[in-house]
Image: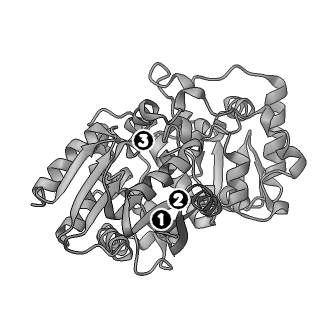
Amino acid sequence: MTDLYPAVHEPAVETWPSLAPPRSNPVRRAGAAAAIRFIARDLPATITMDNRTYGRGGPGMLVHRTGPFLDRLGQDAGSGFGEAYLAGDWDPEPGTDLADLLMPFAERFSSDQDRRLLPKWAQSLRWLVTRSLPTDQENDRAGARENVSRHYDLSNAMFTEFLDPSLTYSAAYFDDVTADLATASYDELSQAQLRKLDSILDAAGVRSGSRVLDIGCGWASLAIRAAQRGAWVTAITIASQQALLAQRRIADAGVSDRVQVALRDYRDQIGVFDAVLSVEMIEAVGEKYWPVYFDAIERRLAPGGIAVVQAIVMPHERMLATRNTFSWVQKYIFPGGLIPSVKVIEQITAEHTGLQAHVIRHLGADYARTLRVWRDRFIDHWPQIADLGFDPTFRRMWEFYLAYSEAGFRAGYLDDVQLLLTKR
């Protein structure tokens, strides 16, 4: 993977005010340094800081600016590490892939208690250096539209540069997920995305004449695929620019007579459908509204209807431990988002609806492969993306987001599941 930015990056703070060097606090800086040393004792990676190395060896991390790096960690443990990367305070050692470097950290989150990043007593003090969820990311109707627009309306052209031709922005379904990630190809991704779309339609029993609701339709790849089977599709999104491109793609595919795209919140949809589909949209709903979301799915299902929800999930204990923490991903990528667990989905559907949910497929390893292709293409196509008006800090932000996510799926800290929902 070719490096396209300087070894030490300087963000434009007028554009990225959150990346301005934080005010130094000697106590917090010392605490962050102690945490780094503690973490590194059993970490299969190498952290080089002030010409000293920490860790047991492995993928290398080079800290360029120790003071700001430690200040960011000490100020906000939830976002500081990622912000330090955006600011150019650290980089992978030359020749080290970013996701490979992040893997040891992700593995600690997915492992047993005695191998977690911090001991239990230290975890109990995290509140001192973590921020709670902000009140301005509420997912009521107005807030949800603002939160979703900040990501999905970012630039249709930018997404087109790295997604496959179907513009499917979710985990693909590969033939072989055991192959070397370095061999993952764009052509392979294109076929895997179509396989994923078909797996959802097959599970929901979508065929000619089926009435289908696609909640959070993205750029309409699933709606188009369903219409090509002869289904009648209502596809809804609350991202205005996304809706415009979805309509154009539907027209180009020749299925405008079978697909209606609506700029509509899932809470406002009416009617009943034979199949209700929702692919990686629940992560943007917010914990407060999960019962509302599943109630809406149940209300839209015709008698005998089937719903399929594809969702990114995390272990239930980790979800409970982090659900009130303002994370780097929420701050920079998905405002208002929260990843659920399979257990909480089962609990909510059992307690608040008449739906029965069970997992029919795990796609965690597939998502790691999907993310690797996206990241490779994003970097390869960076000149074209930069021409759209995005700066080098944006490039670092998205590279970190894609690599961070890939590491989470590779480590098993994250999974992606397809759930079948039927009325009890």
- Residue sitting nearer the eye, 344 or 380: 344
Residue 47 lies left or right of residue 95; in this view the side is right
Q: Secondary structure at mark 1?
A: helix
Residue at figure coordinates x 68%, y 55% from the top left: 105
Q: Position of residue 375 (x, y in %)?
A: 42, 55
Determine the CA span between mark 2 and mark 3.
24 Å
Q: Is residue 337 above or below residue 420?
A: above
Q: How many marks?
A: 3
**Residue 107, labelled with which disc?**
none
Residue 142 lies left or right of residue 126; in this view the side is left
Q: Secondary structure at mark 3?
A: helix
Q: Position of residue 3 (x, y in %)?
A: 44, 49
The amino acid type, in three-letter code, at marker 3 is Arg
* Callout 1 touching callout 2 (CB < 8 Å): yes
Q: Secondary structure at mark 2?
A: strand
Mark 3 is surrounded, within 10 Å at the Cα level, by few (under 14), some (14 to 19) or many (20 or more) other residues, namely some
Q: Say which residue label 1 marks.
A: 367
Q: Quadrant of residue 106?
A: bottom right
First in sequence: mark 1 or mark 2?
2
Residue 60 lies left or right of residue 187; in this view the side is right
Mark 2 is surrounded, within 10 Å at the Cα level, by few (under 14), some (14 to 19) or many (20 or more) other residues, namely many
Residue 149 visible, this angle: yes
Residue at figure coordinates x 41%, y 54% from the top left: 2
Residue 117 lies left or right of residue 279; in this view the side is right
**Residue 312, labelled with which disc?**
2
Residue at figure coordinates x 61%, y 62% from the top left: 350
